[in-house]
Image (cartoon, rainbow, N blue to C red):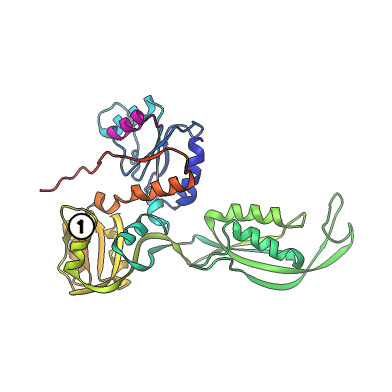
């Protein structure tokens, strides 16, 4: 098992291309070709976490927060970032981060938060734009079923909770095979007319190359005609934050007490409740107050996030109850989520949750 074997799987779970422009997710320290002896999963990378991995004999750390975020001009050990990187390099410990890309996938960080709160009927709070394309190709009817299946298996044809979605029309194609060709139908030098099916399906950009490769492999023609059209629509399966409903309306103070207990936070900061009984909840792990307007427009009663500044609380403006539960507290269960993904994919491989508490904040 190499670092690349594990990180390639994690890139399928949360593709790096989904990270925000300011982010630095992916393999940050170490070689992708190194053999892995074990994995430590953590929220943050600190020298103590690196030491923990070394003591266990493990040489890969998978974290939520990137240890290298703004870039390093010097590595002299003057702060915890440089100390962590130096210690990891010295002991051949690789470090991989899945940050805003893991926030953005449907079954990622915000899904886990929503599960903890019992929120149902979930949808992305701010879906991404321009991440879908339409792929069109043409194939003899006898091979249409097989071709559709190959494309669907590679990641095409998913719309919301539906899969295997396509639109199909019949017609005919014409072509003339030239010298040094091996046509599936027709004769060299003869104009041929073939009854064909036009298959249209949607594909996330991240899956496009794989879908095209699968299509070309399954297609009977020597030269395959296909078109790719960009779609100016939202991709509702990817984006920041989540919104949904509680099973039953609850008193807001009872709800906030439950949140405080469930997330084991020493303090909850919140604006004056704008209604006493609430049902619709929006969430965004980490620093998510930028999604406040989306939470209001989606008619959420409460928006739970972290790192809210004093003046940002005013922006709730009596339209929603804005709740800050703390950065670490909102994302702490990300460790469980990464651990579950790795343990299910590699059940016989050594994966351990870090026992180091990395939260730098204490409460009285």
Q: Position of residue 42 (x, y in %)?
A: 33, 42
Is residue 324 in view?
no
Residue occupying the point 75% across, 73% down: 171
Circle 1: element type = helix
- The residue pinned by badge 1 equals 261
Q: Quadrant of residue 244?
A: bottom left
Residue occupying the point 18% across, 67% down: 254
Is residue 166 in view?
yes
Q: Which residues are magenta?
A: 48-58
Q: Position of residue 329 (x, y in %)?
A: 24, 51
Mark 1 neighbour class, 10 Å CA radius: few under 14, some 14 to 19, many 20 or more:
few
Q: Is residue 101 left or right of residue 207?
A: left
Residue occupying the point 34% across, 31% down: 85
Q: Position of residue 119 (x, y in %)?
A: 32, 66
Above or below: residue 261 compared with residue 247: above
Q: Nearer the viewer, residue 177 or 210?
A: 210
């Amino acid at each position: 098992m190499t670092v690349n074997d594990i990180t390639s799987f994690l890139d399928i779970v949360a593709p790096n291309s989904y990270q925000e422009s300011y982010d630095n997710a992916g393999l940050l320290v170490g070689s992708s070709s190194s053999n892995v002896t074990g994995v430590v999963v953590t929220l943050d990378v600190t020298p103590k976490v690196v030491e923990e991995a070394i003591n266990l004999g493990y040489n890969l750390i998978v974290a939520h927060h990137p240890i290298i975020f703004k870039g390093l001009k010097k590595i002299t050990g003057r702060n915890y970032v440089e100390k962590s990187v130096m210690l990891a390099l010295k002991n051949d410990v690789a470090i991989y981060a899945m940050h805003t890309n893991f926030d953005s996938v449907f079954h990622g960080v915000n899904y886990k938060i929503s599960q903890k709160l019992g929120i149902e009927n979930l949808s992305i709070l701010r879906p991404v734009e321009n991440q879908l394309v339409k792929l069109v190709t043409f194939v003899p009817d006898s091979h249409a079923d097989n071709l559709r299946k190959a494309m669907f298996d590679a990641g095409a044809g998913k719309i919301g909770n539906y899969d295997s979605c396509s639109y199909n029309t019949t017609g005919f194609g014409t072509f003339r095979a030239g010298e040094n060709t091996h046509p599936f139908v027709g004769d060299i030098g003869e104009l041929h007319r073939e009854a064909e099916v036009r298959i249209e399906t949607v594909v996330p950009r991240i899956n496009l190359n794989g879908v095209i490769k699968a299509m070309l492999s399954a297609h009977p023609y020597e030269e395959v005609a296909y078109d790719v059209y960009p779609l100016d629509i939202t991709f509702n399966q990817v984006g920041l934050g989540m919104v949904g409903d509680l099973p039953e309306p609850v008193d807001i103070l009872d709800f906030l007490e439950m949140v405080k207990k469930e997330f084991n936070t020493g303090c909850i900061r919140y604006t004056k409740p704008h209604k006493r009984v609430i049902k619709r909840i929006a969430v965004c792990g980490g620093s998510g107050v930028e999604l406040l307007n989306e939470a209001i427009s989606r008619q959420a009663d409460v928006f739970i996030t972290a790192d809210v500044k004093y003046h940002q609380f005013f922006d709730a403006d009596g339209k929603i109850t804005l709740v800050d539960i703390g950065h670490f507290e909102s994302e702490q269960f990300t460790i469980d989520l990464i651990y579950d993904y790795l343990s299910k994919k590699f059940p016989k491989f050594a994966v351990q949750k870090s026992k180091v508490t990395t939260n730098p904040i204490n409460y009285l």
